[in-house]
Image (cartoon, rainbow, N blue to C red):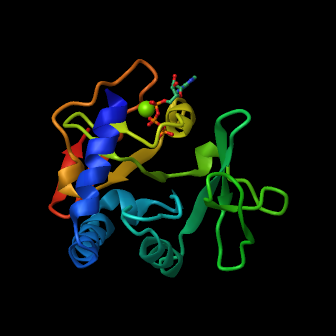
Amino acid sequence: MKKELRLQTLAMLEQISTEEFNRYASLLHEHLLQLPSWKQAKTIALTMSRGKEIPTMPLIEKAWQEGKTVCVPTCFPETKEMTFYEYTPETKMISRYFGLTEPDPQVSAAVHKEEIDLIIVPGVCFDQQGYRIGFGGGYYDRYLADYHGVTIALCLSLQQIEYVPAEAHDISVSMIVSEKGLLYQK
Ligand SMILES: Nc1ncnc2c1ncn2[C@@H]1O[C@H](COP(=O)(O)OP(=O)(O)OP(=O)(O)O)[C@@H](O)[C@H]1O
Ligand SMILES: [Mg+2]
């Protein structure tokens, strides 16, 4: 069920032209940057976006300009856990898991969960209650299980679906922001 919804949504995203996608993405960025949760956050965690994911590099640069600490995750497939490391223009990145660009755990500074004010949570589709379908690893569900800060998902409005068949381990996000503005707030 989750798998079908994930594939259906990814197929819909593929239909959107790059121009249209980029236009929506910059509208979305503007909405996000206005939110008190963004403005007040001193330490922000996000991923390096790929493909038809809302680009995060402009957000990373904005966060740096605003004097915020940025961190990005490295996944550990053996344990299905991830750790966030501080990300600066000097951070040495490696490609290890799934072709993702990640900080090198050997030489990077880990950031504790309690230090992160805001996590930008990736995902494929989202429902009206903030439940999400991610990429299927369960990495975020595990990480968020004992996280107490704010979580925001970024998506195009077409990625919002009626209902996500959430399981006991699924963790909803605090807010969903799209090109139309705030789609959901807890
Ligand atoms: N807290 C947890 N403890 C143990 N297993 C978990 C936990 N959270 C998720 N899992 C397992 O991880 C697998 C993937 O979960 P799910 O299908 O919800 O992925 P997802 O939400 O799309 O992924 P992600 O969280 O990485 O975005 C499932 O088999 C699930 O049982
Ligand atoms: Mg899940």
Quarter in which the N terminus is drawn: top left
Camera-side residue of 79 and 68: 79
How far from the left and from the top, in percent, is residue 87?
Answer: 64, 68
Q: Residue furthest right?
A: 106
Residue 53 drawn above or below residue 137: below
Q: Residue furthest top?
A: 168
Please tell me in which quadrant of the rendered image residue 12 appears: bottom left
Residue 38 drawn above or below residue 183: below
Camera-side residue of 161 and 185: 161
* Residue at 23 percent of width and 37 percent of height: 127
Q: How many labels does the image show?
A: 0
- On the rendered structure, is 99 left or right of 7? right
- On the rendered structure, is 111 left or right of 173? right
How far from the left and from the top, in percent, is residue 162?
Answer: 15, 35
* Residue at 29 percent of width and 24 percent of height: 165
Asked whether residue 131 is in view, the answer is no
